[in-house]
Image: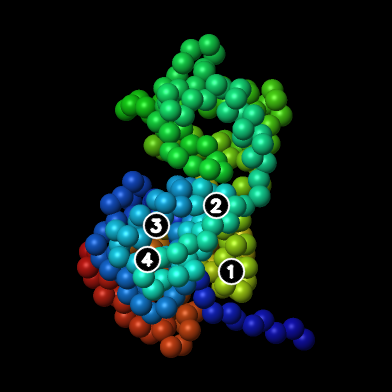
Amino acid sequence: MSTTIERLIKVLMFDVDGSIMPQGGPIHPAIAAFFRALSKLGLIMGPATGKNCDYGRGLACGIGVVWDFVAGESGARFIECVGKSGPPIYKQRVSQGASSDLSSFIKKIDYDLFGRGFSLRGQIEKFRPELKEGILTLFPPGRDLDVTLDWLSHFEDIIDTFGFQLKLQRFSDGCIDIVPEGISKQLGVQEVCRTYKCSPDQILVVVDGSNDIELTQGTLVIAVANAIPELKKIATAFEGYVSEKVDGAGFVEGILHFAESNKFDASINNKIKALCLATLKKLV
Ligand SMILES: [Mg+2]
């Protein structure tokens, strides 16, 4: 006879844009206070974001916490906080990926970081960069978000022609990520398991977008109300939670659900529950 051991949540790992705050922010002051209180309770936590690790650290400074880790660049980079007393000290790890294809891709499009241009069928196309080390992100230079639709088909052609092991993702703000195959937020989950000696089912994730799908493999999922249908389906199928509220409020609603199911350590579970209820009142 097999017995299922119900494991408690050890780590909170959250997507940022659209999951704990509206796309592009700002974070609600009550959500910032919620994070500070969770941090005091000793819950291990950090973001799993498509943005770089410095963005994750900056977010923590604004909130007034120190994350235990940041899984940045959709899993391509991971920093672990190894000293919290005094200025935080971080150790960086580089995830594996087919980065040589990314270097080749950059050459093929005559990518010029400092000139902020690349070659599109013989013309120089302007872009806004986001500084990253393991993936490439290009934003539209102005207000016309549709300009990147043409970039997308051009990049697809190049990747097909040269057989590069790269995948493309285009987001609602027009930005395009060019990501080595093998890089995904799942690498962040693996780093968290290694670092904190836990299994994926002890990690609670908060998600909304298409680059979060790999973050849900084996983990406990909160899909906020504005999440894509695929994530809601995953949350429903694997004992996760789909919130009624959007982004930050949905995140707190999801934490409350897991506290009501006694999924946190008994020493903090009721405190988390009370904290969620108080925070939700401030969010109406
Ligand atoms: Mg998101």
Q: Residue at x 58, y 28 (%)?
A: 106
Depth check, front residue: 195 or 232: 195
Q: Nearer the viewer, mark 2 or mark 4?
A: 4
Q: Earlier in the sequence, mark 2 or mark 4?
A: 2
Residue 244 horizontal/vertical position (percent)? 37, 61
Write the residue at 57% across / 65% down. 192
Q: Position of residue 255 (x, y in %)?
A: 41, 71
Residue identifier under label 3: 57
Q: Is residue 174 left or right of residue 110?
A: left
Q: Earlier in the sequence, mark 3 or mark 4?
A: 3
Where residue 15 appears, x then y in whole percent? 45, 56
Q: What whole-number distance in Å separates the C-alpha atoms at marks 3 and 2?
A: 13 Å
Give neighbour class at mark 4: few <14, some 14-19, many 20+ (Cα, 10 Å).
few
SS class, disc 3: helix
The quarter of the picture where residue 93 lies is: bottom right
What's the distance in space between the residues labelled 2 and 1, CA to CA? 14 Å
Judged from this view, the residue extending furthest toward the top is 122
Which residue matches tag 2?
77
The structure residue drawn at horizontal position 66% and vertical position 34%, both measured from the top left corner, is: 101
Residue 215 in view (yes/no): no
Label 1 residue SS: helix
